[in-house]
Structure formats: C-alpha cells, structure tokens
Image (cartoon, rainbow, N blue to C red):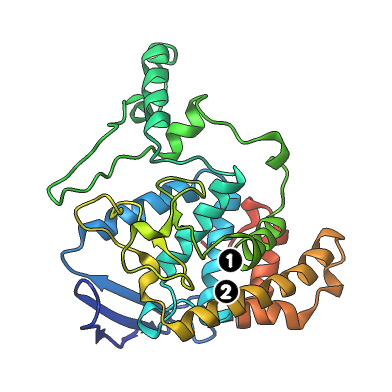
C-alpha cells in the first residue's frame, strides 16, 4: 500500500490530502482511495454526523447522495472548492435541500420537530419497555450550543423511524432513484432561483434570501452551512469558493446532466436497460457509469458498489 500525502495550506482549517494506492477500491480503476485529514476541526465531525443521519432516513437518500458525489467528482469535475467549484460536502447539502423541498426527508434541525419528538417521547416512554435500542427513547436538546458558540442540535434518523412525528408522503413512497436523480438536476439547473435565494438545510425550504450573506453574488449559488449559519458567530456560505468560471461550469454541467439524465431515466423507467444511452451515462459518471446504473436498478439488499 502506497500513500501520497499533500498539505493544503489554503484551506480554512489545516488539511492533509492524499491518495492510498492499490487498496482494492471498486470505485476506481486503480483501486485507490482519496482522503482528507483535518486537524482541530470538530465542526467537520458534526457536519458528517448530520449528513449520515439524513442518509439513514431512506436507502434512496444514501444512493442519491453517492450518485451525485460520483457525478461531481469523476463525471463532470465540479467537486473541488480549491479549483473554483464546490466541495463534495457542499454537493451533499444540495442533495438534502432538494429532498427537503420535495418533501422526501424532514428537517432534522427543525426546532418544532425536535419539540414534537420530545413530546412523543413523554407520551410513549413506557409503551415499549423491551426496546432493544433504549437510546431512541432519550429526549433531544432543542438547543445544543458548544464552546464555539454554534448550535448543533438535531434529530437522529432513528428518532424519525421510531416515532410518528413525520411520515413520507404517499405520493413519494414508490418514487424511483432514477426519478429523484433527474429531479435533482432539473431543480438546480432550471427551477431553483439562485439569483435571490440561498440554500439552507437548516431551514429546509426556499425562503432564505441570499443577501443575508454580505459576500454573496447574484450569479453564484449561496449555500448556508447547517451550523455556521448567517446568524451565528461564524457565518459560512459554502458557495463562496466558486469562481466566476467555476459557477458557469457548474450551471452548464447541471443543464447538460439534466438532458443526459432524461435519456437515461426514460430507458430505465421502461425497463429496457439494453437501450440506455451509453454516452449519457458515461457523461454523468465516467468510468463508474455501469456501477451507477446497476445501483439505480438494484434493491438495497443487492447494493455492493457503495458499501
């Protein structure tokens, strides 16, 4: 096993980036795995925990997140804040926000939802004394401010699944992963008003004006960090790293990907996988195209590529 580390001195926090070679990763032809190591960045741990909770709400959320990550990294090359586009973490925020607006996932940071869960706990705390997972019957703090002054309070995926505080709308119960994928591209390529609105999974709806971030620009995506919010002591617009050329590249690739996804979804929905446009899936996912199509068509129990 070989490791090629490299310091990233321009990052907001100290980072070492590298690649582990010949470790058998099925996602890359050479079997390598890329990694980032951060120092003194407890916020990144909290951010990752929140994304993980969203990914566990429904298996389709997890698959869509990985499909977009592969698309952004190896398909169209729009996943590098250092190169003037957006980080993989930022793209995951875009996935969650799209699913929130669609109604496919709840807002885990919603104070009223946390309060509803705590009320549900009080009403049902003695109803299942033999539960194997006692932790799901713990109340969640509505506010969890740590030493850095940020509020990290949020619900867990288990809180949603065990309680009756939120349910998936009937119209979305049988929606396919391919349809969610197409909807993602069309939403950000054509529907979302990036000129005036900001993306915020903390709010979970299209009501935050981007002018709350002084450095936001009309032609650039404005994405509020879920914890480093505009009202916090350290506001962070995740979209601020995109350059002018990077933003144009992102929009172009979203529009082209929407067109490519229409061709792919049309064939997948007709169950005629043999007629899937190879140019379209190669454009979306590069060398990982076949694996990504298999993932969209397979059941969660058959999933191996993303494990």
The residue drawn where x is 16% and y is 45% is 146
* Crowd around label 1: few <14 · some 14–19 · many ≥20 (10 Å): many
Residue 305 visible in the picture: no
Quadrant of the image containing the N terminus: bottom left
Quadrant in the picture for residue 98: bottom right
Horizontally, residue 226 falls left or right of residue 128, namely: left
Residue 12 visible in the picture: yes
The residue to which callout 2 is attached is 71
Horizontally, residue 164 falls left or right of residue 214, namely: right
Determine the secondary structure under disc 1: helix
The residue to which callout 1 is attached is 67
Horizontally, residue 265 falls left or right of residue 301, namely: right
The residue drawn where x is 66% and y is 56% is 180
- Against 16, residue 271 (above or below) is above
Mark on residue 165?
Answer: none
Residue contact between numbered discs 2 and 1, judged by CB atoms under 8 Å: yes
The residue drawn where x is 53% and y is 81% is 248
Expressed as whole percent of the image width and height from the top left, the position of residue 91 reads 47, 65
- Against 164, residue 221 (above or below) is below
- Give the tally of numbered discs: 2
Expressed as whole percent of the image width and height from the top left, the position of residue 48 reads 35, 56
Horizontally, residue 73 falls left or right of residue 10, namely: right
Q: Nearer the viewer, residue 66 or 290?
A: 66
Quadrant in the picture for residue 129: top left
Q: CA distance from mark 2 to mark 1?
A: 6 Å
* Crowd around label 2: few <14 · some 14–19 · many ≥20 (10 Å): many
Q: Nearer the viewer, residue 144 or 69?
A: 144
The residue drawn where x is 54% and y is 64% is 66
Expressed as whole percent of the image width and height from the top left, the position of residue 231 reads 27, 49
Determine the secondary structure under disc 2: helix
Q: Nearer the viewer, residue 99 or 277?
A: 99
Expressed as whole percent of the image width and height from the top left, the position of residue 126 reads 39, 11
């Amino acid at each position: 096993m070989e490791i090629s580390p490299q310091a990233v001195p321009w990052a907001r926090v100290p980072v070492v980036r590298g690649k582990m070679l010949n470790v058998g990763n099925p996602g890359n032809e050479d079997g390598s795995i890329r990694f980032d190591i951060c120092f003194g960045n407890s916020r990144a741990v909290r951010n990752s925990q929140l994304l993980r909770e969203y990914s566990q709400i429904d298996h389709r959320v997890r698959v869509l997140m990985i499909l977009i990550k592969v698309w952004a990294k190896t398909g169209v090359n729009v996943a590098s804040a250092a190169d003037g586009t957006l980080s993989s973490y930022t793209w995951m925020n875009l996935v969650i926000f799209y699913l929130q607006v669609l109604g496919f996932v709840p807002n885990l940071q919603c104070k009223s939802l946390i309060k509803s869960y705590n009320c549900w706990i009080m009403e049902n705390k003695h109803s299942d004394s033999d539960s194997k997972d006692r932790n799901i019957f713990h109340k969640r703090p509505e506010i969890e401010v740590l030493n850095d002054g940020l509020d990290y309070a949020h619900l867990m995926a288990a809180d949603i699944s065990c309680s009756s505080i939120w349910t998936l709308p009937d119209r979305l119960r049988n929606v396919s992963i391919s349809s969610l994928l197409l909807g993602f591209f069309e939403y950000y390529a054509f529907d979302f008003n990036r000129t005036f609105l900001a993306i915020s999974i903390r709010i979970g709806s299209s009501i935050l004006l981007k002018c709350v971030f002084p450095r936001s620009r009309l032609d650039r995506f404005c994405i509020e960090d879920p914890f480093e919010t505009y009202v916090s002591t350290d506001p962070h617009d995740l979209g601020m790293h995109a350059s002018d050329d990077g933003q144009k590249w992102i929009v172009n690739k979203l529009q082209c990907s929407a067109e490519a996804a229409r061709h792919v979804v049309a064939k997948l929905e007709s169950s005629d996988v043999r007629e899937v446009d190879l140019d379209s899936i190669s454009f979306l996912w590069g060398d990982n195209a076949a694996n990504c199509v298999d993932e969209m068509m397979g059941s969660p129990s058959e999933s191996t590529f993303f494990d």
